[in-house]
Image (cartoon, rainbow, N blue to C red):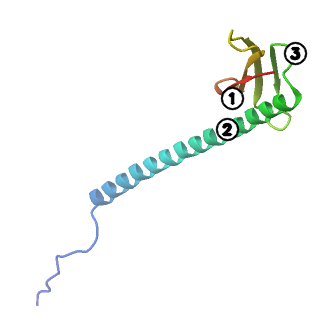
Amino acid sequence: MGTSKNSSVCGFTLLEVMVAVGLLAFAMVSILGIVGHNINLATKSTNYLIATSLADEIASRIDAEGLPLDSQRSGKFDNHPSFEWHIVVAPYNLPQFEATMNIVRVLITWDNGEESYEISFIDSG
């Protein structure tokens, strides 16, 4: 009596497994790249938000205390040591106005000066 073997075998071939692993690896690398990019964007966004807040703080201080006597000043923030501030005050005179006005430029820099945020406004003294 001869026994007949069933020739249908269930499972995956080595080639199918290698293709599936390759596709999975490609998808994971793409996802990790997107996550890394999103982390960089979130960090930049946070730094710009901090810089905006710090520039507003300096502008409010200038409004409350008056303009600095010298035309250029710089410094660092105690609560954000990686951020620096720079203030430039320049006279702005228009013949039709009798009031003395100044252009005030507030520049906030971080990442060793590679990134910056600037606001400018006119102070009527």
Q: Residue at x 80, y 34 (%)?
A: 60
Foreground pick, 22 / 58: 58
| x and y, in percent, of residue 113 in the image | 68, 23
Marks 2/3: CA–CA distance: 30 Å
The local crowd at label 2, few if under 14, some if 14 to 19, many if 20 or more residues have their Cα within 10 Å, is some
Mark nearer the viewer, 2 or 3? 3
Q: Residue at x 66, y 42 (%)?
A: 46
Give SS at disc 2. Answer: helix
Q: Which residue is mark 2?
A: 47
Q: Residue at x 32, y 60 (%)?
A: 17
Tag 3 or tag 1, which sits nearer the N-term?
Answer: 3
Tag 3 or tag 2, which sits nearer the N-term?
Answer: 2
Which of the numbered marks, if any, corresponds to residue 69?
3
Depicted 4 relative to depicted 55: above or below: below
Tag 1 or tag 2, which sits nearer the N-term?
Answer: 2
The local crowd at label 1, few if under 14, some if 14 to 19, many if 20 or more residues have their Cα within 10 Å, is few
Marks 2/1: CA–CA distance: 10 Å
Q: Which residue is mark 1?
A: 111
Q: Residue at x 64, y 24 (%)?
A: 114
Q: From the viewer's perspective, tell me whether residue 69 is left or right of residue 10.
A: right
Q: Amino acid at mark 2?
A: Asn
Mark nearer the viewer, 1 or 3? 3
